[in-house]
Structure formats: C-alpha cells, structure tokens
Amino acid sequence: MYHHGWSDEKGGVFVKSLSPDGSDITITYNGLLDKCGASQVFLHGGFGAPTHWKSVEDFRMQRTPEGWKKTLNMEDNQLTFCFRDTADNWDNNYGYNWTYKLF
C-alpha cells in the first residue's frame, strides 16, 4: 500500500514517502527548535515499538527553505523520533515523541 506521508502541522513535523513501498521517507522539521534559532538540528530516532526503540541514532538534518530535512530508509515498519539541537535542547512533542508507521 502506498503511504504518501503524514504531518503534524502544529508541531512542525512532516513526513513524506519517497518510494512506492514507503521504505524511503523524508522528514521535514520546522518546529520549536527551528523557531528558537537552532544552528543545527538532529533527528533522534529509533525503529520498532515506541517503548522499545532499536537502532537508535542521531541523524544530522540539513537546513532547507522548507525547514530541516533528513531522508531515511525505514529499517522497520515503525519509526519513533524527536529532535535536538547542539545546545542539547529537545523537542519531543511534550514527552510523546512522534511516530511514523508503515501500513
């Protein structure tokens, strides 16, 4: 099933599928850290169930006119993620993080 994407406009998080099976995605972020002037944003994420992250990594995001972007390959059917800047400020959706799931 082709999954076009998902967004949380209020949080400034947008996920776009780049492949028919949804395995390649681009995450765009223009939320709180961006609005506060972060000079670099990292996507902090892990695959699998939201309470049991695996393959946890910090991914350096690239600044673009649309916001901070990172393209990833979905190693599992679910990605749970949040964001941090170089000053160790976090945007974790008020402790709930964000989850993108393939259907």
Image (spheres, grey):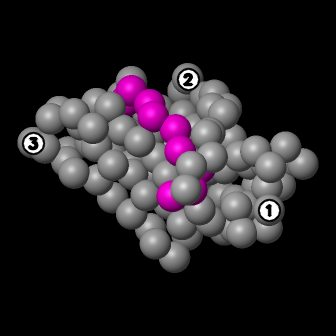
Instruction: Name the residue tied to disc 2.
Output: 55
State the image quarter where residue 60 is shown.
Answer: top right
Above or below: residue 52 compared with residue 4: above
In this figure, which residue is indicated by the disc labeled 1? 37
Q: Amino acid at mark 1?
A: Gly
The residues bearing labels 2 and 1 have C-alpha atoms spaced at a distance of 29 Å
Is any atom of residue 23 visible in this view? yes
Looking at the rendering, in which quadrant would you find the N terminus?
top left
The answer to if 69 sits in the magenta stretch is: yes
* 91 magenta-colored: no
Pick out the residue farthest to the left: 1
- Which of labels 1 and 3 is toward the front? 1
User: The disc labelled 2 sits on which kind of residue?
Assistant: Ser
Magenta-colored segment: predominant secondary structure: strand
Up the image or down, 82 lies above or below 56; here it is below
Give the quadrant of the C terminus. Answer: top left
Q: CA distance from mark 1 to mark 3?
A: 38 Å
Instruction: Tell me which numbered mark, 2 or 1, is placed earlier along the sequence.
Output: 1
Label located before the other in sequence (3 or 2): 3
25 to the left or right of 38: left
Farthest residue toward the bottom? 10
Residue placed at 63% from the left, 32% from the top?
A: 59
Front label number (2 vs 1)? 1
Q: Which residues are magenta?
A: 66-74
- Relative image position of residue 75 (x, y in whole percent): 39, 24
Few, some or many residues within 10 Å of mark 2 (<14, 14–19, 20+): few
Q: Name the residue beneath numbered marker 3.
A: 1
